[in-house]
Amino acid sequence: MNNASKIAVLLFVFCALVAGAWFAIKPFFRKHQQKTEREKAEQFEREISNARVSSTLKIAGDGYLGYFFASSKQTKKEAVRQGLGIEWTDDGAHIADRVAKLARGEYDIIAIPAAEYLIHGRAHGFPGVMVAAIARSNGGDGIVALKDKLPNNDIADLNNADLEWIYTGESPSEFLVDITAKDLDFFNLRAADEAAGGHGPWRKPVASSADVYNRAMNGRGDVFVMWEPDISRALQKNPNLTYIWGSDKFAGYIIDYFVVNKQTLATREADVLKYFKAYFRALDHYRRHADERTTDMARWADIDRESVESIVNQRKIDWLDLHDNCLQQFGISTGGSTITPQEGVIDTILSCADVLVDTNRIKGSDINDPYRLVNTRVLESLKNTAPRSLGQSQDGRIDFEPLDPQAWAKLKEIAKLQVRPIRFRNNTTFEVGAAEEVDKVAKLLSVNYPNYRVIIRGHTGGTDSEENRQLSELRAETVRKRLVLVHGFDEDRLSIQGVGSSQPPELRPGENPRSRAYRGRVPRVEAILVERGGL
């Protein structure tokens, strides 16, 4: 091959390489060109009109009414005024997918119940931090049942593994089921779970709260666990249903939070602050304009105004403003406040973790440091922008009025707390580990069941004698003293009873009354929740 031919071949190869490179980079060049043109167009829009949005945050949740303010018309308006756009996604309560997309950066912020973030966040190394509380469920999640399935019209009737429980799987409804079975000593349900090596046959999870509602309307099941507005709809339309238990009966468990992607917070903190400033301003705006709030909520949730007003007026969903977040949830002190800040978010994480560990949903080692899941920087930055003066409300602690024995006797017993038996080495000396069980009772009563009075009831084994009755009363008094002196309980909240051996514990499935396990549960002290009563 002569030189001319070699040169021609080299030129051909060179041109082919250039052409190939061009076709390879052309898509990237086109994307860059399109981005440049889009930015120029957006810049032109801002110059020629009143357009303000220069950046957008992607936020996800579902149709739970508690999330209304996260994407309300007023929130978007307040954000746009700061140059921020909000792209809200209702994912139909696919919470596992919501957390996965947060981890991949497809969402910047998600709204999620604390327990669900503990369950699903651990699979992704907890990709976000909890920066603000949205709302406490105060009846927004509840259990209704067919009336003919409740022979005593009492929550204790639910301790029946033959009943079919219909609820949304992997949701706050499932967590409500777990709380109920754990805290209220529903040993029949727990025994069925253990026999099945996980979820017992009484559990019937479905895809959504709407599915639960439809089954409740058609009588396909016995016990139905839903969230608002489906609870109100069901009770209105099916007279055979009755509300039996829900998030209005306890505290500190079902609370929803905003979780911000860690990278978003690190690189776009200014935008995150803009969003939450808009959110809290919108919440205050709607509180001052109740009719507008009702109209917008009804449109957002696709329900009638009467249902919205009922939910709001009964405070089934208790939304937390900037003031509440700082002082009640994230332990942030504020100028002029006389209230000691509380770290409610940490209490909620630990309370939820206790339930999830007990039901084998997570491991105890998963939540070694709850503070790694929390970031207070957003609220610290915003605390001085509160639309109302911080620190002016009360701390919410209930002052239980004193009751005489006759008034105590009239109070309805609600449920027995499920804890290990509190036992004694001799007359009134705690057995090893018993004081720690009293401390667990104190935490449950303080954090999760603060609105109930409590009967401390002592039991003994042996014969039904006056001597044993007095001994059981002395032991109940020992527990009461620890609650008052060590944990600061209001004495008027507590009452003691000694019943000796007259009320032996119920036999559990497959249990022999002569077994060592059963006999070990006979001498004990129990905590019984009773209604508050009084004024």
Image (tube, helix red, strand yellow):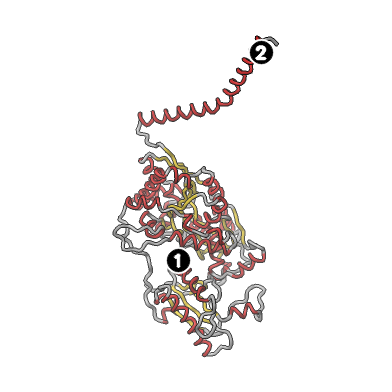
Rendering coords of residue 397 (x, y %): 38, 67
Q: Residue at x 37, y 59 (%)?
A: 327
Q: Earlier in the sequence, mark 2 or mark 1?
A: 2
Residue at left 58%, top 84%? 461
Residue identified by numbered label 1: 447
Q: In front: mark 2 or mark 1?
A: 2
When the figure is inspected, residue 35 is found, relative to residue 136, above or below; the finding is above
Secondary structure category for the residue under label 1: helix
- The answer to whether residue 451 is left or right of residue 432 is left
What residue type is disc 1 on? Val
Identify the residue at the far left of this view. Answer: 336
Any mark on residue 6, and which?
2
Q: Are marks 2 and 1 in contact (CB under 8 Å)?
A: no
Q: Tell me where residue 171 appears, x and y as whole percent.
A: 54, 55
20 lies above or below 505: above
Q: How many other residues sit within 10 Å of disc 1, few (<14), some (14-19) or many (≥20)?
A: some
Q: Which mark is residue 202?
A: none
* Residue at the image position 53 percent from the left and 68 percent from the top: 183
- Mark 2 to mark 1 CA distance (whole Å): 86 Å
Residue 240 visible (yes or no) = no
> For this rendering, which residue is in front, 360 or 296?
360
Residue shown at 46%/62% (left/top)?
347
Query: Quick one: 149 or 353, which is closer to the camera?
Result: 353
Helix or strand or loop: what does disc 2 sit on?
Answer: helix
- Residue 323 image offset from top left, x and y in percent: 35, 56
Residues 82 and 75: in front is 82
Which amino acid lies under the numbered mark 2 shown in the image of this protein? Answer: Lys
Could you tell me residue 317's position as x and y percent? 44, 57
Q: Is residue 145 above or below residue 413?
A: above
